[in-house]
Image (spheres, coloured by chain):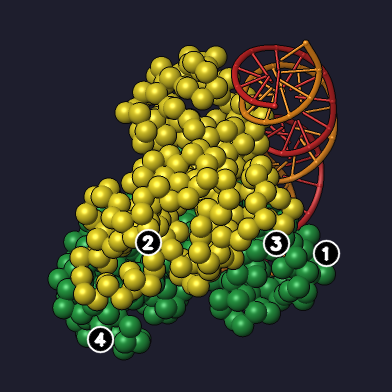
Chain colours: A green, B yellow, C orange, D red
Amino acid sequence: MSAQQSFPVSYGVSLRPAVSGAWPTGAAGGKPGWDNALPIAGSVLNFSQDQEIYGDGDDAQLYFKVLTGVVRTCKFLDDGRRQIEAFHAAGDLFGFEAGAEYTMSAEAVCDCTVVSYRRRSFDTQAAGDERVWPQMFAAMMRNLARAQVHTLLLGRRTALEKVASFLIDWADRASGGRIAALPMTRQDIADYLGLTIETVSRMLSQLERQDLIELSSARQIKLKNPLALRELNA
Amino acid sequence: MSAQQSFPVSYGVSLRPAVSGAWPTGAAGGKPGWDNALPIAGSVLNFSQDQEIYGDGDDAQLYFKVLTGVVRTCKFLDDGRRQIEAFHAAGDLFGFEAGAEYTMSAEAVCDCTVVSYRRRSFDTQAAGDERVWPQMFAAMMRNLARAQVHTLLLGRRTALEKVASFLIDWADRASGGRIAALPMTRQDIADYLGLTIETVSRMLSQLERQDLIELSSARQIKLKNPLALRELNA
DNA sequence: CGATTGCTTGATACCTCTCAACCCAGGTGG
DNA sequence: CCACCTGGGTTGAGAGGTATCAAGCAATCG
């Protein structure tokens, strides 16, 4: 389990961060101004590290866009095994659901800011602004495409390939390709790659011994040989 | 590898099944009449077992709905490792792409019939019929939700749990819950679950020894104790 | 009837997990 | 300032699960 803080509050309906100074910084209903792709008014919300944004089974009345920080969406098995389905960084949307309830939970990997949009207002406004659907569709599609490469990763790659692939992905997304600045713990990485923390650690050490990366610190990883790393990905 | 037949033809543009009597049975442009959810005219096409419907890298001008039979969508690594991302049965849509090209390939698991829709006509007609987007969106969402449970399966389940989960899923989808009639080979199952055929076979044998299933034949599997099977899924 | 294909079973190897110890940085309190 | 504690991370030894390699069986097909 990961949520250290235990708020006695369900976020399902209002999705206010409830306690602990996590109130919206922007006025509720204010435009995020992040871009104009999704012209629906949203509420800006802050979440602190490891705070739950929504839980599996909550009413799925909102979907979200990340402004700053990183969010993880994950599923759990009864015995506590966790699988992180995706990390969402600035610009990514998450929280789409087919049914009435969330089928995953979302948590803040680090302190982060997100915008929430109401599904209902989205549904009703959609008819009036047909530009909305294509935008949503594109965001969905990105998530689906990512899920598909993740599937290949989990099913058919070795531990070393998984870690190498993860580093490249993250470096591409975040810091322009040569440095992976990781906001997440080894446990997060392990749960994303379907490994244990020990194996993740060992593979990182192995990559460093092979001079493909350099662990400036545990969370700052320099890709010394990105091409060789990419070749591990067949 | 799985495609036994080797057609010297690229399906990229016209997506004609090319050789081997796989021409459309319905007139091109004829309405599929499957349901009226997607009012865009489509072409009905037949594909024989293991025939490629489209390949990774082909122009993604069409998307598809399965009428009869089963289609697999999969990715390959350079060394031949294959990961099946999904099996699509009657009513399922597949072939959605964010970009201009397919990022997976699609093949017929058994002889099957599909309808193809033009992306372009979909894009242009969408503005005129706002009912189209929600329908597409719902189909996407189903695919995304499936990808997410698949992720959990691949990352955090044992071989036995994977096979049990697969049997339950398939029995639910196809034959009303108690019999899994499998159109796919053990290799397909293995590539879907991230296992080898030997392990799949062993797990099936183990489930049979535990009296949870009965292998009437290799492809006809009776679930003698569905509840116990489900409990393997935590 | 032999050959092929799909599937099962066995023996062994290897990769990853498990359990454990240890290291290190940061925070707290005496 | 230093002792202590804590959480995150690394490393090692051994166990265990799945892959690999190999043989054999059954059904299908030419």
Residue at horizontal 38 percent and vertical 72 percent from the top? B120
Residue type, numbered disc 2 = Tyr
For mark 2, give the secondary structure: strand
For mark 3, give the secondary structure: loop
Which image quarter is the C terminus of chain A in?
bottom right
Distance Cα–Cα, label 2 vs label 4: 37 Å
Q: Nearer the viewer, residue B62 or D9?
A: B62
Circle 2 crowding by C-alpha within 10 Å: few under 14, some 14–19, many from 20: many
**Residue position for label 2:** B117
Q: Which mark is residue A31?
A: 4
Same chain check for tags 1 and 2:
no
> Is residue B4 visible to us here?
yes
Q: Left or right: A70 with respect to B131?
A: right
Distance Cα–Cα, label 4 vs label 3: 41 Å
**Residue position for label 1:** A209
Distance Cα–Cα, label 2 vs label 3: 33 Å
**Residue position for label 3:** A233
Residue type, numbered disc 3 = Asn
Mark 1 or 2: in front is 2
Task: Give the mark nearest the N terminus, 3 or 1.
Answer: 1
Q: Which x, y percent locates residue A78?
A: 41, 39
> Is residue A4 visible to us here?
no
Q: Chain of mark 3?
A: A
